[in-house]
Image: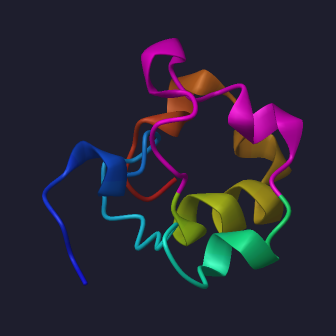
Amino acid sequence: MACNNTKNKCPLCGKNNYCNVAGDCWCSRETFPEEILSLVPDHQRGKACICIHCLKEYKKNPDKRNSATINKPHW
């Protein structure tokens, strides 16, 4: 279910994160490296989940792991 709430927007790319914190969510079965969590802006930490696309791209592309590329929608 898509939502316009900022909690449902990935803090890295701005797209829907499809997080369902109230139920069984894909994010509860994933491991988020500390390095990607540190890229979330301070004002969004603990308030919005990183989307699966950003997580997978981060893990797949070690050369693109910096804040200069993080705000681009598709790495």
Say which residue appears at 71% left-offset and 36% top-offset.
37
Does residue 42 appear in this view? yes
Closer to the camera, 57 or 43? 43
Q: Quadrant of residue 67?
A: top right
In the image, residue 53 above or below residue 25: above
Which residues are the magenta region?
A: 32-50
Say which residue appears at 73% left-offset and 71% top-offset.
28
Q: Answer whether residue 7 is magenta in the image.
A: no
Q: Answer whether residue 45 is magenta in the image.
A: yes
Closer to the camera, 60 or 53? 53
In the image, residue 57 above or below residue 37: below
In the image, residue 31 above or below residue 35: below
On the image, the x and y values in percent for residue 41 come to 50, 20
Q: In the shown orientation, is residue 3 left or right of residue 44?
A: left
Q: Quadrant of residue 65?
A: top right
Say which residue appears at 18% left-offset and 67% top-offset.
3
On the image, the x and y values in percent for residue 54 come to 57, 58
In the image, residue 17 above or below residue 23: above
Closer to the camera, 24 or 2? 24
Does residue 9 appear in this view? no
In the picture as drawn, the residue positioned furthest to the top comes out as 42
The overriding secondary structure of the stretch rendered in magenta is loop
Q: In the shown orientation, is residue 12 left or right of residue 35?
A: left
Q: Quadrant of the N terminus?
A: bottom left
In the picture as drawn, the residue positioned furthest to the front comes out as 22
On the image, the x and y values in percent for residue 38 come to 72, 25
Q: In the shown orientation, is residue 63 left or right of residue 26?
A: right
